[in-house]
Every structure is written in C-alpha cells, then in structure tokens.
Amino acid sequence: MTKSLLPATGAWRTGDPAGNRQFFTIAVDRPFALDGATSLTHVTTAFETWGALDDSASNAILICHAWTGDSHAAGQAGRGHVAAGWWDDIIGPGKPIDTNRWFVVCANVLGGCQGSTGPASTHPVDDKPYGSRFPVITIRDMVRVQARLADHLGVDVWHSVIGGSMGGMQVLEWGITYPHRVRSLVPIATCAQATAQQIAWGAIGRRAILLDPRWRSGDYYDAEPGDGPWEGLAVARMVAQVTFRSDNVFTDRFGRELADGATLKDGFEMWQRFEVERYLDHHGDKLIRRFDTNSYLIIGKAMDLHDVGRGRNGLVSAIARIRVPTLTMGIWSDMLYPSYQQRQIRDLLVSAGTACEYVEIDSPHGHDAFLINLDQVAPPIEAFLDSVAKQ
C-alpha cells in the first residue's frame, strides 16, 4: 500500500469483520464517571475469550494488553485480525496458560481502537466520531470498565490478572482497586508510577503528532486516503520503538550499514538511510495500518498519568492494599521500564507482608523481551498459576 492510499485511521470500525471479538456495552441508562471528573455513555468493550468458565467460576484469568495491543492475545491472523495473537505461544490448549484448564479473557482497553469505545468510535449524540471530544482517561478508568465486564461474564474473582508494560499497570490497579476480586497478580516490565523520563518519551511522540497538519486537532476521520495524520503517528512510533529495544540489539543487528545497497564510497547524501532507519520506518508505517492516532495519544497519556499512589496517600499505602501472591518480572536490558521498578514493586509488597517473587528475564532485547523471550516468560507464569491453585 502506497502512502497516498493509507487510511485516515487504522481503527476497527462498526461494519468491519468482527473476527473473534465479542462486545459488551455499559452506561446506556446512566453515565460512566471517569477519573478526571468527566463521563461517557454507551461504553463498549471488545473482548475475546478462550476456554470455559468452570462451575465454581474460579478458573478465570484476565490478560491485559500493552499500549498498541488489543484483545487478540491468542489465535491466528485472519478475517478481522491483521496479525496472530500477541501472546499466542503462551495462551491455548496445552500451552503455559492452558485453555483446557483456564478461562482466559482479554479486553481491548477503554480508549483503544480495536472495537472498544475510543476516539474513533461514534459519539452517541450525533453518530460522528468522538475525535477531539474524547476525554482524557486513566488506567483506573480502564480497569473499572474491565470490572463491569467481569460482572457480565460471571467472574467475581480472577484466579490471576496478568499483563506486561501498560498491561502491568492495569494488573497493579486491579490489585489495589479490587483487592477482593483477585487471587494473584503478574505485573511484567511495568511500574507503580511513571517516571519523568518515561513521560518525556511520551511527550516527544505527542509533539510529533501535534505538528502533523493532517492531525487537524484530532478531527481527521473524514480525510481522504493519504490525507490522515500518518506522518505524525509514524514518527511517534519510531521514537517509541527506540525505547522498546536495547543499544546492543540495535548495534548487533544493524551496525552502521547503509540501506538500499548504498555505500559511503558513493558519496554522502542528506537522506541516505542507514539500515536502522529503514527498520524504524517499517515499524512506523506498520502501525499506521492497524492503529488510530488519537487512541495512541489517549492511551499514551493514560500511561503518563499512571501513579497507583495518587489519591491513596502515596505508593506505600497504595501497594499495601494488595494482599494476594504476586509474581513480578523485570528485564535486565529494559531501558523504558528498568528492572529496578519491578524490584521496587517486589520490595514494597514484601514490606507490607505480601508474598511476592521477582524473576528477571535475561535478554538483550530490551522492553519487548516480554513479547519475544517467551521461553523465559512462560515457565514462571505457569508455575505461579499452579502454586496459587494449590493454596
């Protein structure tokens, strides 16, 4: 697809193939109050399930996705799903999260763009996309919507809530906001509160989108193909992609090689690309086709606002509300969410008298290792789920 044919948004829209998505809507009769003193009505959650809920409703596991993830955590690519499940090697029959045993749920978050209510969704008042009218939301808002979904599914208590990166933020909020609705938690490559540097990376991406004239302050959904804010989103994704991997991986994979068969013997040109630039271009262009620019902004802002201690007398008081066994996992080469942040979660929990195990993933791949090094991620999760079941 040439850039002149790129859609204004890569969001899933009503009328598109649903694939394996199911849908649940709340706040039809009364508004859903948001953390930021605003509200939404007709809030839809797109979700997928695997396995079956047992008679005691005690075998349910919630999987929480990261920034640009969605509900398709497992399963093949196909009609309605542009790619295979992002944790397909972990979730399924006979796999570490065995769907012959567990009832697994994954929901596209509030503010997302793959079936859940977000900026690309139609406003219930005028049936036009929310666009710039969509409010700022928080991780807590996402989790409160998920709690309503759990009610709908008949799940009073999750056996475990599991997620990496932004998914890990949701995991912590579940344990703090609904301590009696979880039996265990697995936050991976995440933090208890966003740091100044993490916010700084997000700010650069937001500025790239703001400076794209085709963003039109968020109201671009009627743009012709090629006239949407694809350049701003691509640059924002390129910036983020640098933080997802480590210096060693970039150096080992790309070195200083030029792209497109060029050599320095041919002379110097301003826009002559290195191989690493081509890699970043690829990831920027790839996201345009499956994501929405406004959702990228909304979810990124929620991550920057993430602070489990806000309004709860600080981190120590907030984390002390978690009273269930926890497995936290860090990645030694993670520059975006350094492993000290996961060790901090472990230390705070242990200090509060809550059982917590810390596992560090030995990988050069940086933050994305929780999606890549599944041989190290899956076994501790499988063993932890078993140990909780025996308690």
Image (cartoon, rainbow, N blue to C red):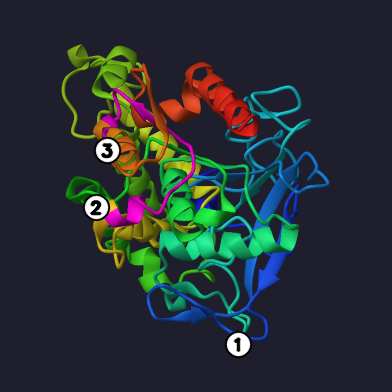
Q: What element carries label 3?
A: helix
Amino acid under disc 1: Val
The disc label shown at residue 300, or none: none
Residue 105 pos. (x, y %) = 67, 46
Q: Residues within 10 Å of mark 3 (few under 14, many from 20)?
A: some
| For residue 367, above or below residue 6 | above
Q: Which mark is residue 344?
A: 3
- How many marks are shown on the rendered structure? 3
Q: Give the range drawn in magenta.
A: 317-339
Q: Is residue 16 visible?
A: no
Could you give the CA–CA distance between mark 1 and mark 3, rounded to whole angstroms? 45 Å
Residue 258 spot, x, y in % from top left = 28, 19
Residue 74's place in the image compared with 252, above or below, is: below
Kind of residue sitting beneath label 2: Ile
Residue 244 lies, in percent from the top left, at 34, 34
Residue 332 lies within the magenta run: yes
The residue under label 1 is: 125
The label on residue 199 is: 2
Foreground of the two, 384 or 131 = 384
Q: Which residue is painted at 29% across and 56% down in the image? A: 317
**Quadrant in which residue 364 is drawn:** top left
Few, some or many residues within 10 Å of mark 1 (<14, 14–19, 20+): few
Quarter of the image that includes the C terminus = top right
Magenta-span inclusion, residue 173 = no
